[in-house]
Amino acid sequence: MDITVLLGAPGSGKGTQAKRLSERGGFIHFSTGDMLRAAMKAATPVGLKAKAYVEKGDLVPDDIMIEVIESALASVPKSTRALLDGFPRTVPQAQALDSRPATAAARAISFEISEPELIRRLTGRRICEKCGESFHIVFLPPKAEGVCDRCGGRLIQRADDGESVVKHRLDVFNKQNTLLLSYYSSTNKLKRLQAERSVESIQKDLHEMLSSDGLR
Ligand code: AMP
């Protein structure tokens, strides 16, 4: 398996980019946030354990998350090119991935973006309750208000995208991210991407970064 870790604050565009790359083919997108939201909706044991943390914008404990990602990665072929979006969020999570040759990260790409821009993006974000597609009331509005362009589902604001929870999520992110950046730079796996640009221009750079590593 070839694993690319996408690092970056909530709202930095990792999910949008990973979704696009996986739709073009060649990559599988693993979003631990999407996995938890699905588990919460289905009220599975993991969903029930995670709910209170997710709603407050806190991190779900490492042992639960490591199990979630390990079982997701175990369910795909060994030849998979995986894009990890939202995992790892702590150094112990990164170490858990790297502790097995089969799941060790080949590279980490950090999406870099300013805090005021993140707050604008997150509080205006709307997601489809059916397929998870992301929109923004100003930057990426759907064709018809409140309706998903892709599947016709209803667009809702995530419970954790309200302003006070967003600020808390960014604080949590900033604390852990500094440690994660040092972890990946100490092993020469870190690449940085300026993410305060259009979706298309970031996609082009990301594609080039992956191509230069022999992936396309
Ligand atoms: P996201 O959609 O990536 O912003 O994730 C939504 C929420 O899910 C986060 O605010 C956390 O509560 C939880 N979560 C997702 N991935 C992780 C992870 N790797 N470690 C801990 N909590 C996570």
Image (cartoon, grey):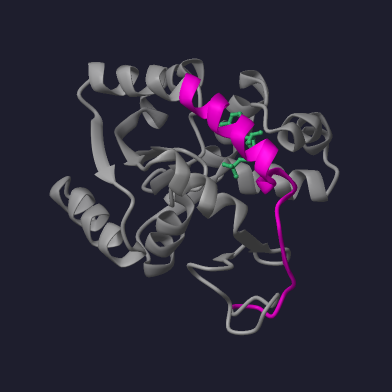
Magenta stretch: includes residue 121? no
- The boundaries of the magenta stretch are 150-175
Judge whether 169 appears above or below 2 on screen.
above
Q: Quadrant of the C terminus?
A: bottom left
User: Front-most of 58 and 122?
Assistant: 122
Q: Residue at x 83, y 49 (%)?
A: 42
120 lies left or right of 95: right
User: Front-most of 29 and 103?
Assistant: 29
Magenta stretch: includes residue 158? yes
Q: Quadrant of residue 203?
A: bottom left
Which corner quadrant of the figure contains ligand 1?
top right
User: Front-most of 48 and 176?
Assistant: 176
Residue 22 appears in the picture as rendered: yes
Q: Residue at x 13, y 49 (%)?
A: 212
136 lies left or right of 105: right
Q: Position of residue 81 (x, y in %)?
A: 36, 48
Judge whether 20 appears above or below 12 on screen.
below
